[in-house]
Image: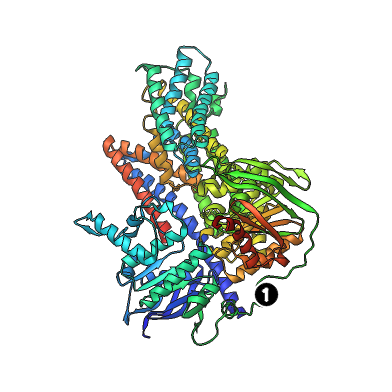
Amino acid sequence: MPVILEMKGITKRFPGVIALRDVNLAVKEGEIHAICGENGAGKSTLMKVLSGVYPYGSYEGQILYEGQERRFHRIADSEHVGIIIIHQELALAPQLSIAENMFLGNEPAKNGIIDWNEAFRRARELMQTVGLKESPNTLITNIGVGKQQLVEIAKALSKKVKLLILDEPTASLNEADSAALLDLLIEFKAQGMTSIIISHKLNELARVADSITVIRDGATVETIDCHAGQVNESRIIKSMVGREMTERYPHRSVAIGEELFSIRDWRVEHPQHAGRAVVKGVSLNVKRGEVVGIAGLMGSGRTELAMSVFGRAYGRNITGTATLEGKALTLDTIDDAIASGLAYVTEDRKTLGLILNEDIKHNITLANLGAISERGVIDEAQEEQVAIRYRTALRIRSSSIHQRTLDLSGGNQQKVVLSKWLFAEPKVLMLDEPTRGIDVGAKYEIYTIINDLAAQGKGVIVISSEMPELLGICDRIYVMSEGRFVDEMPAKEASQEKIMASIMRQYAGAFQ
Amino acid sequence: MSSQIQADAAALKAEVRGQLWKDNLRDYGLLGSLLLIVLFFYLITADHASIAPVNITNLIMQNAYVVIMALGMLLIIVGGNIDLSIGSIVGFVGAIGGSLIVYMKMPYPLVIVICLAVGMLIGAAQGVLVAYAKMPSFIVTLGGMLIFRGLTGNMLLGQFVGPFPKGFQNIASGFLPDITDIEGLGSALPDWATNFHLISALLGIVGALAMFVGAIRSWRRAKLDGMEVEPLPLLLGKNIVFAAIIIGIAWNLALYKGLPIVLVIMALLVLLYQFITTRTVVGRRIYALGGNLLAARLSGVKTERLIFFTFANMGLLAGLAGLVVAARLNSATPSAGNGFELDVIAACFIGGTSASGGAGKVMNVVIGALFMGVMNNGMSLIGLGIFWQQVVKGLVLLAAVFVDVYQKRKG
């Protein structure tokens, strides 16, 4: 197969860091080419160089596409030749319809007047190609993330795409939607389209990829030909982190004490739709030194449960009781919850976790300014020391504690959020998808932190959609579905099949 | 391998230092442009009238309201809101104050207290609507702007209410006492001393020295604590310039009638808000909620209460500005404060405050306010028509924000 794209000796510098160091990438026509690497390794930067987000001249090296040297000065230049990138954060206008979004910036128009009949006809065609069963009139805000992803792909198809680049396309999709998306890629491949996929989900890559290029610390490590021999997850991981990861989950010695925190008969209604129950009578307990997992599909009410417990940060008409160390808790405000010793680490670090425009230092101390101030006046030297302490302890990769959190990679951003809550000195931590979108190496570090917390006698509640993760780090697992806990099992006795079976048992009745 | 790491670390350190220089230079660019326009008007006004002591005194008295209210507006904008009602509050508070003094014959110290309270209450009421009722601040304060302008008109019925007692007027047009005011001493002094306001000059020198020593000491403490500090030459250079400016202004004013009382009020407020924004928990939290409201709330910040506070605070400062304006005009007028909100908001944005909230500095906003003041004053001196003045001010606002946005995009 001929090579459609070749990037040669790409070097990209930012103030303070070299993001890419002499990176080479060769993509063959008609293949699915995966790029993987740890967070901050430079994958997204490389794709931004390719698509013209970083214009020609701002990097060193050469881009050859369809045999010619290309110099893209803006995204439109790369789109013009058929290179389309779909970013991790979808770029759709929520209040516009599917059809409107699909042709945004590319409207079928004559003299500036849009031919809506033509637009709808083509929208229907494209939606059929990607298997999206919705009306083209439906607003984006009314469809789920999985379908939004399909709209993005249909939009790419409408632009006569030859090389489709997907940046973490399945990061926020559930398993069924992820599988459908990957199938679609395989189908496109059969029709001769080339795609580049960036992903952390190694099992998916092993399924669809023809070649895998591994990037580490801004440099290409190797390109693996998936058809040449056995490729498995540990082979890729080894290449990514530069060492054999024999243990995906750090070992820990479990020392579980008496009951620390519990909630009884917890009920929550939807904040906008009164009467619609989201959490329906949940009881839960955590012991000292215990790591408890909550498994379940997306939308099962796990995040809603945790946030409602955390000072009613979600929902209305919340009822139920909570106790900590045997004493009843008042959790009417987030302030109460923090003062009582609870912490909630959000699943959405960018919108709910960080002040992106502020530096690492200010983010770390935000939830516990009382500890570094006297009569409302901040002790700046003390604050500096706190920030340095956590930056070192959690190995936050950054130029200094004064670096803006916006400029950090996902894993390092997550470490800043974790630092903030560690500094608040909680007794019970609720971690919501603590390793979403971060690489294997950083995951391992975060698991180690969780173990340390448990070893200090804290209670840890982990919400995760990755079942192997729950099985790997928890002592006990609750299974949540449709707002209820449908099962509870010691992690030793649990398996992915058993958890899925508990969830499905719920629906079994529906088909009888 | 280890030499590579060392080289990287060294490069990083140099980078951080470079960034500190750059951040600082951005701030001093603003100060530099202020000095440039001062120089410009110095050169083109007849007999250098722009730096005549009487003109500097006028400039301060005319623009005190911008500086005073810009301090409150900074907090509002940093919190992600806007307040359009402050010009009307200035008029309304002036009308109440004037009526109480002239018609009700109330003692003026009591009137001052009442007026400040009225300003704060208006701000608080708008704050309740914005913070707790979740109405957009633009709309709430647009309503307030109309309501209080209308109430001012109704209360004054087109009349000028005045004049006021001397003590009240002093808020805006009084000066600090001098040693010549001490009985029996005035005639005993030589001529130069009676024509020169010794206390004001001394205050300027003492204030400048205190600032200089304070800056050096906190720099040294920070360095000893292992914090990253700005380069010493930059610190010395900027503080020498600052000290020279303060002494220069005090000396200049001493040649006329001394330090205006309103300048002292302004200076104290600037110091207070500088402290609040940079050193206190409340200040930090306002910046955090302006940067990301949801994340701040999930970190335990009581966002509603703080937004409410920024509006109540703005109302209080608008009340103070209302007193200053009424005292300066020596009467309450229906149009007092008309359009002031725009001067104040412009001062904030010229000073580099972020329109989307979360960022802005007191010192830069003060420079922004002075920038506007110097331009107003200078253009009047050279006889530029009032309408052209507006055009120039608009262009300056656009240019300042353009430079800001451009620099940010360049990183």
Residue B269 is situated, as x and y percent measured from the top left of the image, at 54, 36
Closer to the camera, B337 or B262?
B337
Examine the rendered structure and indicate whether residue B179 appears above or below residue A328: above
Query: Picture quarter containing residue A143?
Result: bottom left
Residue projecting furthest to the front: A512
Q: Amino acid at mark 1?
A: Glu
Query: Picture quarter containing residue A104?
Result: bottom left
Identify the image quadrant of the C terminus of chain A.
Answer: bottom right
Query: Picture quarter containing residue B9?
Result: bottom right
Residue B231 visible to an observer of this rendering: yes
Under circle 1, the secondary element is loop
Identify the image quadrant of the N terminus of chain A.
Answer: bottom left
Residue projecting furthest to the bottom: A228
Residue A108 is situated, as x and y percent measured from the top left of the image, at 25, 60
Q: Is residue B374 left or right of residue B132?
A: left
Closer to the camera, B248 or A454?
A454
Q: Is residue B64 left or right of residue A476?
A: left
Please give the name of the residue rendered at 38% of the width and 77% of the height, measured from the top-left corner: A190
Pinpoint the chain carrying mark 1: A
Examine the rendered structure and indicate whether residue B89 appears above or below residue A423: above
Residue B45 is situated, as x and y percent measured from the top left of the image, at 31, 41
